Image (tube, rainbow, N blue to C red):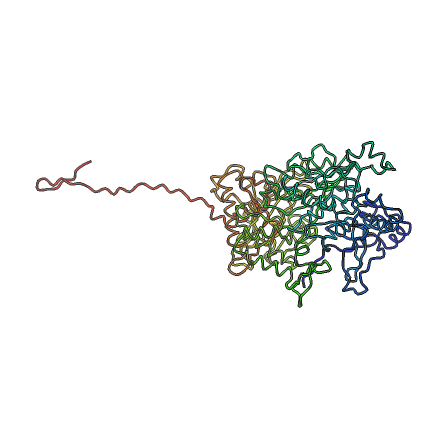
Amino acid sequence: MYQQTLYKIITPIKPHVIKRLNKSRKWEYGYNKEYDIIVISRTGQIGEIYEIQDLVIALPLEDKPYKRSNKPLEQYWEVFTPRKELKNIKTIFDWKAYPLKFKEQLHDYIDEEFRRRDEGFWFYNKGVATYLTGTHYMYLQWSKIDVGQADFREANRLFFIFWEACKSDTRSYGMCYLKNRRSGFSFMASGETVNMATISSDARFGVLSKSGADAKKMFTDKIVPISVNYPFFFKPIQDGMDRPKTELAYRVPASRFTRKKLDSNAQIEEIVGLDTTIDWKNTGDNSYDGEKLALLVHDEAGKWERPENILNNWRVTKTTLRLGSRIIGKCMMGSTSNALDKGGRNYKKIYDDSNVNKRNRNGQTRSGLYSLFIPMEWNYEGYIDSYGYPVFDTPKSEVEGVDGQKIEIGVIEHWENEVDGLKEDPDGLNELYRQFPRTEKHAFRDETKQSLFNLTKIYEQIDYNEDLKHSNVVTQGNFQWEDGVQDTSVMFVPSKQGRFMVSWVPNIIQQNRILIKNGSKYPGNEHMGAFGCDSYDISGTVDGRGSKGSLHGLTKFSMEDAPANLFFLEYISRPPTAEIFFEDVLMACVFYGMPILAENNKPRLLYHFKRRGYRKFAMNRPDKTIHKLSVTEKEIGGIPNSSQDIKQAHAAAIEAYIENFVGYNNEQYGTMYFQRTLEDWASFNINDRTKHDASISSGLAIMACNKNKYRPVAEVIKEPLNLSFSKYDNKGGQSKIINR
């Protein structure tokens, strides 16, 4: 059975503490620094605490859930039929015309709807008490979408809980939602826009999309209809047309201020408006620059193509959501991703920078947003049952869907069938992955034609590795000298905080194999494999980031007990000091007894090897004979990264390895298990190699294991052969040689 959950219930606070503070209703809406949780309850009481994509969220305490039926199987979300008395009441002015006795019959009903809007709503769903945020309730109960009423989906419930946490957290600028196609984001964002705008005064709400036309369409086809269909008691006074094209204005029309109109109304409150607007802008880097927004909806943010740049726009629009250091507005950003070269790369940057586990000292993520990804199987139309849950596995008997249709096959099997049908169409397959991703990696798949290497094989291997992620083919850990004494024996110590990823270690006899020749240390397992390394020289950088040090180990064919052509080690890290990195690399080489080919334009690593007595572990560049090496190359070894010949040879080495040993070959999959390296290969740019540390070191490892391919051919100077024949003078009785 396929099992997956989008959240888990945790207990970071002792129950007696929750009970004590619940009794006095001391839990305040917003971020609670003391307990490091985000409270979305407006009642002063909390119940279950959810963890959704590492965001810890305290829900309200369960409060008399609505029960459609006493039978659990008959309990599900169902839209409440609006009171029939509301049918002919379109505006607050219509309402005022009715007698008091009529109004009193609806007061409790209207008050309850406002309470649900503010505090949320509890109902039983197949026997389980289920919480909807106020925004989600408004979306389900009062928002009209293209299919009429929106259906309840568990995925959307968790989406709205996550969004409520973003709204309540004063550290957050909003959310960055990585979604699948037809997940309902545009309608949910439109519903939230109207919901917030109709309870906000002196505020502005904005909409952007991948083009101005798309933003306009979202405004006219989604936002405006939702606003029009709100009941009168949620609908503020509106200026202009009922269905505007550019701006929805919740303010008193100028015509209301005529003397005649004023005289006809008993109370001045009748003509008080919110002075709140909703509009859209054309797509551009400076859209909404200089404005102050309560909410910015960024629809289709992963599809901004050149010359438009979502990164530049977000840097501008982010300032519209704050006054100084105080965040006064939120952004609801969501999208599937285009190919990386068509806007996807910039969106991926924002998404990666929205990781809630990576915060600055102000408690904010690098982007200011919080990232959320919901796999396609949770939100795929046609595979949601009547309780709003996905039908993962093919059922033994038909299941009724939320749309009333029968579900005969599970969504996982359906998706796999789609994938199998596109195996011969790599770009079509990657488009399917981007539109309906099951992992974040799927969502950011690139077009095969954009890559220097065979993306089909790389992605085949990535997918295969994903299926193996729980099979322990890779172990994380660190190397250390035995008893902490340098230049003795090295041990590998597994650790979840380790910097090394290892898929194979040699047997005990092969470990720490060092040969001593003429007083120098040589690697004893050079015939078994080699390392490649992309080093760095400076411990710290101005921005605190900098490129990482990268090390890869690769075996080659040998008669030893070792797998051939296996990348067995990956190290992509930047320890606090460069010296720690140098020692890490040295210990790995000693443990495996293998040489290393490193770039010598950053020579400190190679000088470290020489200083410690391991110069013979550092390979010389294989494309030159020893007498052709420079003085420095003779001293420390290594290979430069500036030569075009070296760059081309390096890229060709990776390309050949991928073709032969990555992906599906000869009815079996390759054994390249390091996902970060595979992803780096997928995005490798030979003209901008600085961002691809893993590709640099892995390519050098391949070159090191195949050094004979790059050995220069000795020039042999040969004298030209004289094949001419002598000529004779045959006059007379004796022939004579003609001298030339």
Residue 4 position within the rendered picture, expressed as x and y whole percent measured from the top left: 70, 58
**44 relative position to 647: left or right:** right
Query: In the orientation shown, which residue stands out farthest toward the right?
Result: 24
Q: Residue at x 25, y 43 (%)?
A: 723
Residue 214 appears at what percent x and percent y?
Answer: 64, 42
405 on left or right of 564: right
Quadrant where the N terminus is found in the figure: bottom right
Question: 540 or 309, which lies in front?
Answer: 309
- Looking at the image, residue 38 sits to the left or right of residue 468; the answer is right
Rendered location of residue 607, percent (x, y): 60, 40
Residue at x-position 61% and y-position 37%: 308
One can see residue 635 in this view:
yes
| Nearer to us in this view, 658 or 276 | 276
User: Quick one: 245 or 612, which is closer to the camera?
Assistant: 245
- Is 402 drawn above or below residue 632 in the view shown? below
Q: In the image, residue 252 lies at what x, y percent?
A: 79, 36
Residue farthest toward the bottom in the current orientation of the protein: 396
At a point 80% along the width and 50% down the height, the residue shown is 86
Residue 520 visible in the picture = no
